[in-house]
Amino acid sequence: MMRHLKRLYIGIVFFFLYAPILILMIFSFNKSRYMSKWDGFSLKWYADLFSDRDIMSALYYTLLIAVLSTIIATVIGLITAIGIHDMNKLGKGIMVNISYLPILNPDIVTGISLMMLFVFMKLELGFLTLLLAHITFNVPYVIFSILPKLRQMNKHLYEAALDLGATPFYAFRKVILPEIMPGVVTGMILAFTLSIDDFVISYFTTGAGVSNLSIIIYSMARVGIKPTINALSTLLFISVLLLLLIVNKRTSNNNGKEKVI
Amino acid sequence: MSYETINLIDVSKTFDDTLVLDNINLYIRRNEFLTLLGPSGCGKTTTLRIIGGFEEPTTGKVLFEGKDITHVPPYKRKVNTVFQRYALFPHMNVEENIAFGLNIKKISKNIIEEKVKNMLGLVNLRGFEKRTVDSLSGGQQQRVAIARALVNEPEVLLLDEPLGALDLKLRKGMQIELKNIQQKLGITFVYVTHDQEEALTMSDTIVVMNEGHIQQIGSPIDIYNEPKNAFVADFIGESNIVNGIMIEDYVVDFGGYIFRCLDSGFGEKEKVDVVVRPEDIKLVPPEQGMLKGRVLSVIFKGVHYEMMIESNGIIWKVHSTLMEPVDTIVGINIFPDDIHIMKKVMVS
Amino acid sequence: MKKSWVAYPYVVWMIMFIVVPLILIIFYGTVRTTPQGMEFTLEHFKRFFEPLYIMVLVRSLYLAFICTIVCLLLGYPVSMILASKEYRDKKILIFLMVIPMWMNFLLRTYAWLTLLEKNGIINTLISFIGLPKMDLLYNQWAVVLGMVYNFLPFMVLPIYSVLIKIDKSIIEAAEDLGANSRTVFRKVIFPLSLPGVVSGITMVFMPAVTTFVISRLLGGGQFLLIGNLIEELFLKSGEWGFGSALSIIMMILILFSMAIMSRYEKENEGGGLL
């Protein structure tokens, strides 16, 4: 009895979580633009989606910003994490606490503060400011993914490599980097998904002509229902699902236990 | 009131199609210190958990003072447990941990306080009342776990390898202390361990288990001196176990010599296991020995030397306080009361 | 071998893009321009205490509070059931719990927009059984619903991860000492899960109190939260001074409650609660 009640409860919660997404997906194939009734199967919203220049350009910017900001943030974060790891207690404390600010602060505060900075610097809001903002909120996540790995690492490894004749750069490449690689990968994945998903900070730091998908969805949804968004959701949901499955499979193959969530 | 506190009757247990207990029959007497001894995976912990009520047997019954308690949940049994890794409540201090069971019984505050105080005295932890659990050493945590169980005045205390996580010296001390507590309070202890020495030191009764079967039940002296089969002999203390053939009653052939022994009742020419303890082998000059052998190796073990001696293709382990150098030829004597003859059993 | 110098480039970046922007907020929040130039002022903060704006703050806190309570009541049992040994396939269930979090949260919110609107699915079902259509959208309950939907996994996951780590033998020990399942929950499981509950509350309350998207999409224009107010001040009316002051207040609010929560968590670790 209790068992069935528990199953029922879990069922209801998952229904609550998934029903809205599933309905959205189903109605992306509806002929009618209204979601009150089913008018027959159609792919016309998908066709609309791919011919909508605003959405296509937003997709382009979303991916471009995500890729660029991830690469730059990973490089900066990796180098900085190694530097922070070697700092004395005070320096480490200051660096860690300030880097934590963008994570702790509400996104809206980070967003408007960056916007004020860009306006103050007379930078025109657009692609560059958007990219700078994304790098700024991504770097801390990379740093905090790598720092624990550095702490776990045997500190004599690097010295052993030097002792055996490796140059510092060679020792970094062949000894340190492989040790902290899992942290680097986690940081990268985190940065990429945060960048793709971000709305609030992007909303305040971009300008006319440059939008990402979140911004487009927001401005369309404010006006009302548009079935192209349903089609877009379906495609995004499926790609997220595929990506997660691949990442999950890869990590569970690699180390059995650890799981990227 | 019956003389037996707990009875296990035809108890079997399977986990996911693996048989871990096969038809166990066991009674536990009032006020005895009974030890379940065996290698890991022998079913000793499962037996204990069935008595505690954490597992239900697949078939069979558990009786407590004659009453069937097979399906009674743990919180309604007059049995308490000291868990393997103590399982202290991390969010409570020492005092709150010990008072946990009493608080549930809704006993008045004064009495609880009194009892907790007495218990802390018994386990030598006075003054630790307000300490957090993780500020204690392993040995201290162990004492809290014992006090937490004993304060409920159980009829039977179950202890699941309680000293397993302590270092050797602490273990020895705690063994004596536990035995003292048991004798002082007159409670039945059921103790699980894989350490044969611990079992021999503390128990009134030892139950040797292997692969879900009981191999032998008896007093420590019985089990050590009269192991029922080769498994028990091997598990309890060190032994030389060799193949032999019974010639007739009181005469056995092994190791290339015909020995006199004290055993009878075997079939003629029956193949048997012969067990000889290393300390029971006497070394003599070669010409006086029943067997002749060559010393292969010598290790100093503190109190005695351990020598491996080869004779007629058999390697004997010998403990002696006198050292014979490697490659010496020595004589080996084994006297009738040091020879233990056992029926061959399939021990996989 | 000190390599700490390699972090210096980021020090510059950090000062530029983290420290300076925060200084700018404080600057704009405490300065006004007069014909004579700039001068220090607290007028922006004073303005906040007008009943209109206090109401906005109260409403934000109230809705976030309701959302947190609902998430806790709804999510705790979910975590407990998922952590119980009955489910062998719990990895898959946890995976299913995580997937919606990876979905763009604007889309998750938009999904409810389509469900709740006048001609949406729910109203179609309602009229199908003969009841009049209802105004489900653009009220505060729609906003709470959207928040709960978006943030529920943030409550479930931390509690689950604490529950799953509780040593089974501790629960057995409590049973052994005479506790029935209710007492085991009350005296052992719940107190031990408190760190998870605290981080769940933090992870739900913080985004709920600062959101402006959910309230804009599901609450329409009229249910103004503090986030919406800040958005309007910066993007529509251009009142940077007052907007900055509000941002400072919000930041203090968040950092303050974070500090309380983390202190509470630490106290809890040492035991002694209940």
Image (cartoon, coloured by chain):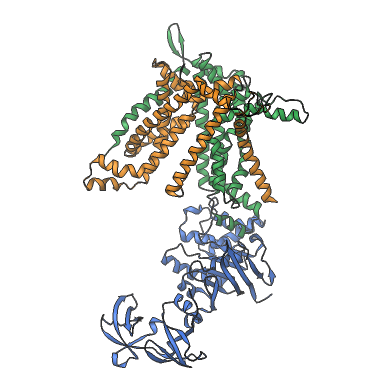
Residue at the extreme right of the image, as rendered:
C130
- Looking at the rendering, which quadrant does residue A123 occupy? top left
Q: Position of residue B75 (x, y in %)?
A: 64, 59
Q: Nearer the viewer, residue C269 or B338?
A: B338
> Against B275, is A251 above or below?
above
**From where the camera sits, is residue B205 visible?**
no
Number of numbered callouts drawn: 0
Q: Position of residue C253 (x, y in %)?
A: 53, 28
In the picture, which quadrant includes the N terminus of chain C? top left
**From where the camera sits, is residue B345 visible?**
yes
Chain B as rendered: colour: blue
Q: Position of residue C117 (x, y in %)?
A: 66, 25
Q: Which chain is orange?
A: A
Q: Which chain is green?
A: C
Q: In screen coordinates, is A91 left or right of C108? A: left
Q: In screen coordinates, is C204 left or right of A177? A: right
Q: Nearer the viewer, residue A135 or C32?
A: A135
- Looking at the rendering, which quadrant does residue C121 occupy? top right
Q: In screen coordinates, is B181 left or right of A160? A: right
Residue at the extreme top of the image, as rendered:
C35
> Against A175, is A77 above or below?
above
Q: Position of residue A206 (x, y in %)?
A: 45, 20
